[in-house]
Image: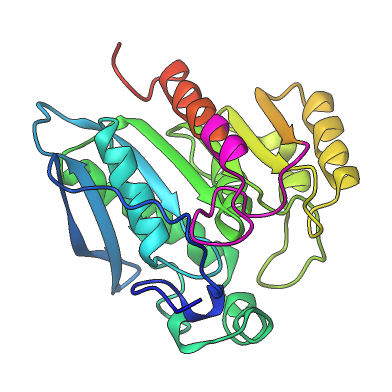
Amino acid sequence: MTEKTGFAPAAAPHASTIVSTPEAAITAGETSIPSQGENMPAYHARPKSAEGPLPIVIVIQEIFGVHEHIRDLCRRLALEGYLAVAPELYFRQGNPNDYSDIPTLLSNLVSKVPDAQVLADLDHVASWAARNGGDPHRLLVTGFCWGGRISWLYAAHNPQLKAAVAWYGKLVGEKTLNSPKHPVDIATELNAPVLGLYGGQDTGISLDSVETMRHALRAANAKAEIVVYPDAGHAFNADYRPSYHAESAKDGWQRMLAWFSQYGGKKA
């Protein structure tokens, strides 16, 4: 299948199920966010007709960066009434579009991005959003794959966060200088309710690790819920990839919106 414009090369082959959200009712585009002495590229989208400060959703990228799928997720959230912002969290270390295969992308770029840098950058995204039409009292986060793991960590990092939704983010793993903690290690530190969405057929995130996380959350008495879709694999929301599982993706999206609404993301 031919490569689709705007998608990361390493994410090929691309599927025929790509969802493309029209922009007629939203305002969307590129921006630059000051963070830790540098200007971080980001994509943002918001409804055109909104009045007053909007609830903020920070959208955290997959390993492929802020390519067309992540931008489209921002547009979908804008149609739901959110200010959605997706920062390029690898920008200091490199460009995901320079890599044509996943193993090289992981070893040469993704593994070199420190969690501490990412969490600090996300704080600057939240500040930027609050200065640009967002409501800092309704701050939410969602992330996919690599970003799913970061969503768990951010829920333990920022006390202002109201809710997080983590899509198929790794829960356990080897500890390194760049990644000293994983979600299972911070179950006792969560500041916000977290919804985790996982695939029962995910070969990279075992059901054993999901159960380990559930036990950690229960032991911590954390306000969190994990949903496993039995027929879905990894990246089941990625409509541009063969891994897309439409039924699970649509259910997960509705659960995410309900989670955000329940915990203060939108006005009734």
Q: Which segment is the magenta one?
A: 230-251
Hey, which quadrant is residue 246 in on the image?
A: top right
The percent coordinates of residue 22 (x first, y second) are: 22, 48
Q: Residue furthest top?
A: 268
The percent coordinates of residue 202 (x first, y second) are: 77, 52
The percent coordinates of residue 94 (x first, y second) are: 45, 84
Q: Is residue 171 above or below residue 197?
A: below
Q: Residue at x 56, y 74 (%)?
A: 13
Q: By what rule are the colours in the image chosen?
A: rainbow
Hey, which quadrant is residue 79 in on the image?
A: top left
108 left or right of 55 in image: right
Q: Residue at x 45, y 34 (%)?
A: 161
Q: Residue at x 33, y 48 (%)?
A: 74
The magenta stretch spans residue 233: yes
Quadrant for the C terminus in the image: top left
**In-front residue for pair 215/255:** 255
**In-front residue for pair 185/149:** 149
The percent coordinates of residue 153 (x first, y second) are: 61, 48
Q: Is residue 26 above or below residue 35?
A: above
Type of secondary structure dominating the magenta stretch: loop
122 left or right of 189 in image: left
Examine the rendering and report whether any part of residue 156 can be seen: no
The magenta stretch spans residue 103: no
